Amino acid sequence: MKHDENCEICKNNIPFDIPDEIINATIDNNLIIFAGSGISTESKSVNPLSFYEDIALELNQDPREIKLTFSELMSKYCEKPNGKKELLRKIKDRFDYIKSFQYSYDMATRFHNELAPIYLIKEIFTTNWDDFFEIECGAIPFVTSDDLAFWDIPKRRVFKIHGSINNIGSIVATKEDYEKCYKRLKSQFIGNYLKVSLSTKLVVFIGYSFQDADFKRLYSILKEELGELMPHSYIVTLDKNINKNIDSRLITPIITDGTYFIHTLKNILIEEKVLMDDSIDLYAELMLEVIENIHYKVMSELKISEYPNVLYTYAYQDGVLDALHRFIKLKCTGDYYNRNNYSGWLNVYYEARKEKVRSKKYQDVAYIDGYTNGLGIFLVDNIEELKYFPWYYIYGSKKDIKDFKEYKSIIKSKKIFHKGAYNNEVKLISKMKIDEGDYIYQHTPYLY
């Protein structure tokens, strides 16, 4: 993501020095991201026309000459019959269009994908309507005061000041909507929580211009409400003339692209060993493809009706697959990039394994062995170590089996490594009513 004037995507990746205050606040879980539309759908890399320009053109206005603010223009659009309904439809259509094209969606969510691994950033405030923080960062959305009853849940949260596309009636777009919204921020609990959060933590505004009427209004309300308690904050912007318009005692500009800023912060946290390297994404993708192919090969060539030991291989490989699939589903939360989490997760499964051994639930033991080995994939220091991964499993065998030819030879020898486990397999297989020796065994992700 280096700066390159000739690259449309990275031409704005202007080198900068990230303040220690931001790094320390992130490590201490005291950094809040306040995100505007510039990091999402309104970026020129997503759509050549902003929503403002789109609406202006529909009203036969030249976007370069029109003097109306965003909310004033939206109100003007709503003056026509069914205007508000049509405006909301256009907003939804815009998001649906972006989501329907992979390139557009990838461009609109670049910021979110950079942010996702940073598990230390738990609070996001945004004036954006889209649901990209929910989808790409696993954030729980908070739109109304009623939602705040659940604010203390230990998950990443996104406070949506101007509503959400998933709750059309909550969208703040027109001048009238804005007035109601800011009255709520001044008088209701949701506004009080915003003020408390922003007065006690370090805030970085990203995706706004200081000339943005929306940002100026919001910032002025915060200054008015917080007074002398208004903390110092930062704004990440491409406006090189911003110093003429700000009070440097209250807000410091960082001149660079918002996505590049988060990318740089992430890399510093990786270097400091606070955050696991996001190369574990690659580990998951590579290993998943390999284990799926191996799993199919075992099932297609070795039938459990003839070779009962294969049953535990199925359970073991199901465990590995579930560990990898779960990572892919939940990596957006950032939890998998916190190395400290793994010892807790593994201890839970190790304790469960002891109980399953005592109760002679050998299929569950095999599944747990697969799942914990799957988790261990993300803890290796070098991708080269993955070539030693034990792909195959025979209950009672002390040897890691990595080669199918070797595994097949052992299975066909019908050697019994653990008599109790083998008898358990035979008994279970006899109850399966296998037709012509073909049966697909699947261990579910539940351990009762």
Image (cartoon, helix red, strand yellow):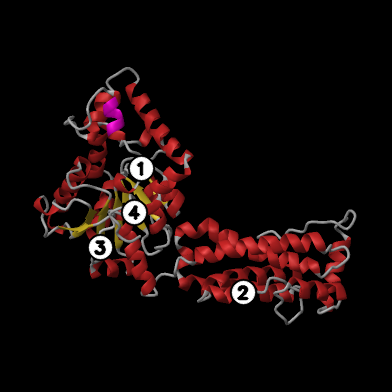
As shown in the figure, which amino acid type bears the numbered disc 2?
Answer: Lys
Of tags 4 and 2, the one toward the viewer is 2
Q: Earlier in the sequence, mark 4 or mark 3?
A: 3
Q: Earlier in the sequence, mark 1 or mark 3?
A: 3
Of tags 4 and 3, the one toward the viewer is 3
Q: Residues within 10 Å of mark 3 (few under 14, many from 20)?
A: some
Identify the residue position indicated by label 3 in the image.
15
**Label 4 to label 2, Cα distance in Å?**
40 Å
Residue 249 point in image, percent of width and height: 11, 60
As shown in the figure, which amino acid type bears the numbered disc 3?
Answer: Pro
As shown in the figure, which amino acid type bears the numbered disc 4?
Answer: Ile
Mark 1: which secondary structure? loop
Q: Residues within 10 Å of mark 4 (few under 14, many from 20)?
A: many
Residue at screen point 21% across, 57% down? 255
Residue at screen point 66% across, 69% down? 370
Q: Quadrant of residue 61?
A: top left
The segment highlighted magenta reads 53-57
Q: Residues within 10 Å of mark 2 (few under 14, many from 20)?
A: few
Residue 41 - label: 1
